[in-house]
Amino acid sequence: MSSPRPARFTALVGVATHALEVAALGEGRYRIAIDGRERIVDCRETGAGTFSLLIDHAAAEVSVANRGDEFQVAVAGRTHRLRLLDERARRRHQRTGASDGARELRAAMPGKVVAVLVEPGARVERGQGLLVIEAMKMENEIGSPRTGTVAEVRVRPGQAVEAGELLARID
Amino acid sequence: MATSHSERPPFTRILVANRGEIAVRVMRACRELGIESVAVYSEPDRSALHVRQADHAYPIGPAAAAESYLRIDKLIAVALESRADAIHPGYGFLSERAAFAQACADAGVVFIGPSAHAIAAMGDKVEARRLMRKAGVPVVPGSDHALGSDGEVEKLASAIGFPVMLKAAGGGGGKGMRLVESPDQLKSALRAARSEARSAFGDDRVYVEKAIVRPRHIEVQVLGDTHGHVVHLYERECSVQRRHQKVIEESPSTALDEATRSEMGRVAVAAAKAVDYVGAGTVEFLVDQERRFHFLEMNTRIQVEHPITEAVTGVDLVKAQIEIAAGRPLGFEQADVVQRGWAIECRIYAEDPENNFLPAPGRIAVLRVPSGIGIRDDSGVYEGFEVSTHYDPILSKLVAWGATRDEAIGRMLRALGEYVIVGPTANVAFHRWALRHPAFRAGDIDTGFIARHFTPAALAEGTEADLPLIGAALAAIARGGTAVGANGAGPPGPPRSRWRELARREALRE
């Protein structure tokens, strides 16, 4: 009852990449190799999206939700975000070219622009505040997705923005 | 103030003019008292928890609060149509609008809260300072009246001496508030404070106070009845704040000795009596490093953090509000109120501590709520609920009680470890960080605690790095590969069918 052909994934966690191989051993057990390090995991899905794991008798629980290849995994109160690509998706990802962050800054949710903190042409560091947007009754500073130069700012203070709307481009 | 079973319920039907966890909290009190509850809901809130919890529910308009939860005319119309005899405003929304209290009175519906007069007196922050000083309540040195011109502000600021605090005259809650360290910062801070105050309160007048260095925010809960009795229910320490918003609260406070504690209680009662206060209210103080306390403002409503007072005093504050509004006497004296043990509250928000605390709404895919000894979770959400972008990002309030502070902290850490929220990103890990921090453990906190100590990197400590990867991979396999790699066009390729194969084999393993 063992699988000769493991499933392979590439996990993208922030800027790091990990190679995963998962082989089902039967009876809820899996051999999981992360960058070549093998671990035997005893797994039971104890609820929708929740998995009880025993790894060398150490007990852990993880809860998982995903939209496409974007995964959210809650472990001990912390939400981890990662992308999990199969081999085809990985090739596609390589072709489009992974950069150190998106060039386009888009609104994560509807809100109102309170302040614009940078001018086109400014040098910005990854994470540096570009805009302040009010949403859910709170003012939030929106950081740059990458280090680069502000190519354009598409919004003005006072302007309402929709989720997904382009706010700025960083080259 | 325990209602005996033989007693008639204080009201027949209460309209709860709010949403989320506080609406649910009020409805629970109603049910315990044998009162029917009436929910109101905006369009996206049709499936919200407070509608599910209520006995009756009425739509009041679109998502925007200004067109639904803030519409006095619609709320009064629903109260009359549903034949509610009282309205509970919760916190936020209309809870501190004198006009709403007045509209209720005019419609013959009891407003569960203080009089319109008391709300107005405390809502005007400058007028409140004047009243408090007259009542012998210590206030922070500063202006006696709202300052219209920038020149006036500059003159007064240099007279009191920097650093100073600019505050909105029209309302509190951190809006329009700016710390000004030196004269050269004054002009830009003034511009920002005025613009924020104008958009929040429709009033750009500000006033100036001496800034207290490394203040602790400590507030006192009071209850006043319609028979002239006012008692306090001791303090809540709310110094763990982010941008003037409370995040963690505890009762008692580690900062107070018995003498200061009882003096603050006495002063809070005097403050309430100065405006003939009726109902539950909170007198907020700033406490400096020398343990001198200064009146900050009075909140004329139930507070978010009221459960920690309930935990240490055993008084159900929401029920007390309802019974007081019905004209019943408090039924206990100051000497009957004792602090027992220690309680801590962590506000569970849909926000991402690793991404500048950005609100992170979304559908709750997985929700597991902690329980067990000493734990209370006042929630406004459920698994499958869509947390909307239109309202406050609060999901729930987790409260831990222990015989000692250490026990309460240990319990809270245990409960936070049990809390699972997937979908929206929640700040659970942030709370674990804060409660483990040596400064918090030592009670060495002030309103700058988070700004001074927190870095997102601190959250990464102690997490098993492999677990998220293992979890994601196993979930992908359990879902038969339908999710992974499915965002591209074209027919499913070999890797996907291989996952299906793995999943099938798994399914057949028995």
Image (spheres, coloured by chain):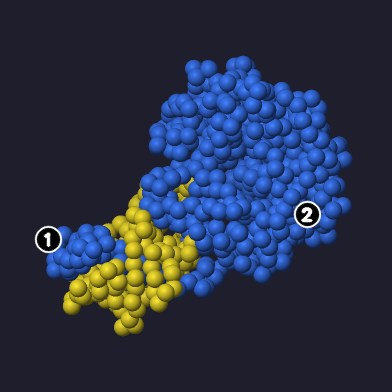
Chain colours: A yellow, B blue
- The kind of residue tagged 1 is Pro
- Alpha carbon distance from label 2 to label 1: 66 Å
Residue A138: horizontal and vertical position, in percent? 53, 49
Relative image position of residue A103 (x, y in whole percent) = 34, 65
Q: Are discs 2 and 1 less than 8 Å apart at CB?
A: no
Q: Secondary structure at mark 1?
A: loop
Count the labels in the image. 2
- Residue B169: quarter of image: top right
Circle 2: element type? strand
| Left or right: B99, with B329 as reference point | left
Q: Position of residue B204 (x, y in %)?
A: 64, 40
Answer above or below: position of A24 versus B139: below
Is A117 located above or below residue B154 in the figure? below
- Give amino acid for label 2: Val
Image side of residue A65 versus residue B382, left or right: left
Q: Nearer the viewer, residue A7 or B148?
A: A7
* In this view, the mark in front (2 or 1): 1
Q: Which residue is mark 2?
A: B287
Q: Which mark is residue B491?
A: 1
Direction from residue B301 to residue B83 in the image, left or right: left
Image-quadrant location for residue A88: bottom left
Q: Residue furthest front?
A: B510
The answer to which of B479 and B135 lies nearer the viewer is B479
Image quarter (top left, top right, bottom left or bottom right) of the C terminus of chain B: bottom left
Q: Which residue: 22% across, 65% down?
A: B509
Asked if residue B139 is positioned above or below residue B242 in the image, the reply reads above
The reply, left or right, for residue B120 in relation to residue A86 is right
**Of the pair B287 and B462, the residue shown nearer to us:** B462
